[in-house]
Image: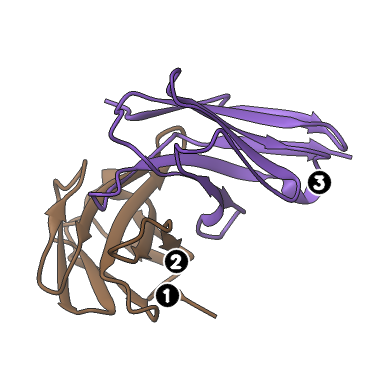
Amino acid sequence: DVKVTQSSRYLVKRTGEKVFLECVQDMDHENMFWYRQDPGLGLRLIYFSYDVKMKEKGDIPEGYSVSREKKERFSLILESASTNQTSMYLCASSPQQVPGGQFFGPGTRLTVL
Amino acid sequence: QQQVKQSPQSLIVQKGGISIINCAYENTAFDYFPWYQQFPGKGPALLIAIRPDVSEKKEGRFTISFNKSAKQFSLHIMDSQPGDSATYFCAASRATGNQFYFGTGTSLTVIP
């Protein structure tokens, strides 16, 4: 069964802390994505990566960075967490050639106090 | 701006009824239109998808209707069941790109 896993389901951090969210996929997909999900706003793309060490900004990259050192792993970094970054964070992956939809992880509910 | 507009925001349907969720897009370069279903505490899961070369796609009780000239597509859930209660997202993407654009979601509640 194909899978996208995220390191934590729930996370509570303090303002100013550095936060790492990890995502791993076992489908050998080239593309990986980080979204945040907020009520009424749907899914908003933060960053995506189409290859190892490659990254592209999405719609809301401010305050975030990413790292992709291995094909199966894509990390989202909040350099200095702020309360407005409290949200549900979703990781997804998809194959490169055929647009066959994205496979999502279960999400990480991040609360910044 | 929102690349894909979705309505309604919430929907309540009686068991056995038809649930209809609508989406509209502007970019004519989009050529892949998936729908995702998300249950509370879970990530979205691909439900059904359509390419613009067909006007309708059916999988079980779920049907996508696609109107290329109007740049609209919709999800129909026939014989809606309480187990269908979830949030539904439409999306659009280009074959040449890797970005997916999502609607804002519809919270569906099917009452027994």
Q: Position of residue A80 (x, y in %)?
A: 14, 57
Q: Residue at x 80, y 40 (%)?
A: B80
The amino acid pointed to by label 2 is Gly
Q: Which residue is mark 1?
A: A5
Q: Position of residue A17 (x, y in %)?
A: 19, 63
Name the colour assigned to chain A in the rendering. Answer: brown
Please say if the residues under marks 2 and 1 sit with CB atoms less than 8 Å apart.
yes
Tell me the chain of label 2.
Answer: A
Residue A3 shown left or right of residue B83 in the figure: left
- Callout 2 secondary element: loop
Q: Residue at x 37, y 55 (%)?
A: A99
Q: Quadrant of the N terminus of chain B?
A: top left
Q: Which residue is mark 3?
A: B82
Name the colour assigned to chain B in the rendering. Answer: purple
Q: Residues within 10 Å of mark 1 (few under 14, many from 20)?
A: many
In the rendered structure, find residue A105 and report the number of the disc placed on it: 2
Tell me the chain of label 3.
Answer: B
Residue A109 shown left or right of residue B80 in the figure: left
Tell me the chain of label 1.
Answer: A
Q: Position of residue B60 (x, y in %)?
A: 74, 51
The amino acid pointed to by label 3 is Pro
